[in-house]
Amino acid sequence: MSRRFDWKILKTLLRSAYHEEEDIPISDHWRQQTMNRIRGLAPDRVRQGFAALFEPFVWRLVPVTLAMILALSIALSNFDLVSDSEVFRLFSYELEDAYAFLDAD
Amino acid sequence: MPERTSDKPSDMEIVQRVLNGDSEAFAEILVRYEGHVFTVVRKHIPRHRVKETAQEAFVRAYQSLHNFHREDRFKQWLSAIAVRTCYDYWRKQYRNKETPISRLSEKQAEWLNHAVSLESASDIEALGRRREARALLDYALARISAEDRMVVELIHLEGLSVREAADLLGWSVAKTKVRAFRSRKKLQKILTPIRRD
């Protein structure tokens, strides 16, 4: 069959079928059931959990945290990161050399 | 629709009461918007599952009330929740392969052949057999994905704009546009072989 496929016509037909729906009565029983489910749920703010209680404080602490990070960064950049054992080893080599020099004399 | 009518509390006031722990105040929202939610849901869901899905939409709305902002319009916000609940229903159905893949009867195939041969809109009125059209629609929608189904229903059947559909589904406009184009092609492909029978 070589008919022209007319999408517009078909769409109009499908649209009218789609919109032709019978009303569904909403009963008191359905309302009661829905409200029972709602009552069974914990209030949303409580459901967010224990951590949510501290949320307002977290934002207040942000400037303090940033200041601490900055101070620690400056302090770390000023510290010498060579460990004590490294320093001791360096001195011990120098002492050994000095003793070796004295022994040679 | 304005949120406040005469001396009735506004939607925002009710939402605030619920958020402050008065869950009974939600009953006012239920009564105010049950008709609207049923209208949205029954367009997308089989008749026997409409009540259950509408209830699920209200429960989700209750659970998401803290996301509702003053500047939003409550009805639109609730519509988006209802549409996404329908979308989740279909995703679950497709995942569990619970969607019945119906077959078109000879009578329905014959109807389709006749329908596509119509010349004008007035002929469509004369056709008058909507039951076959609905069966054909169910047949085609059962063969596309949940995403495509929602896009076909919202854009091609309800006549919403791409932006409106995107807002309801929570997708980007670009994604919705691409989906709309592809889903229409899929639908045409599904319906074309039947027509040629």
Image (cartoon, rainbow, N blue to C red):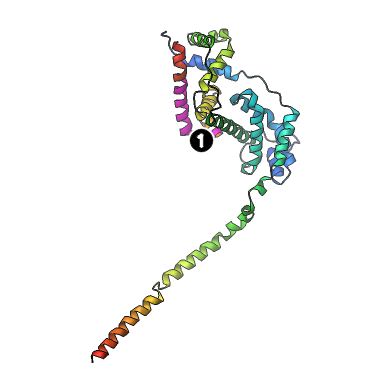
Can residue A16 be seen here? The reply is no
Q: What chain does badge 1 belong to? A: B
Q: Position of residue B24 (x, y in %)?
A: 74, 40
State the image quarter where residue B65 is shown: top right
* Residue placed furthest toward the bottom: A105
Q: Main secondary structure of the magenta part?
A: helix
How many numbered discs?
A: 1
Category of crowding for the residue at label 1, using alpha-carbon neighbours closer than 10 angstroms: few (below 14), some (14–19), many (at least 20): few
Say which residue appears at 48% left-offset and 11% top-offset. B116
Query: In this picture, is A52 found above or below B7?
Result: below
* Residue placed furthest toward the left: A105
Q: B174 or A34: which is nearer to us?
A: A34
Query: In this picture, is A49 found above or below B179?
Result: below
Can residue A72 be seen here? The reply is yes
Q: Amino acid at mark 1?
A: Trp
Magenta includes B180? yes
Position of the N terminus of chain B by quadrant: top right
Magenta includes B41? no
Position of the C terminus of chain B by quadrant: top left
Say which residue appears at 63% left-offset and 23% top-offset. B47
Classify residue B27 as left or right of residue A69.
Answer: right
Q: Position of residue B161 (x, y in %)?
A: 52, 27
Q: Position of residue B28 (x, y in %)?
A: 73, 35
Say which residue appears at 71% left-offset and 26% top-offset. A26
Query: In this picture, is A22 found above or below A31?
Result: above
The residue beneath circle 1 is: B171
Classify residue A97 as left or right of residue B114.
Answer: left
Say which residue appears at 60% left-offset and 35% top-offset. B81
Q: Which residues are magenta?
A: B168-187
- Badge 1 marks a residue whose secondary structure is loop
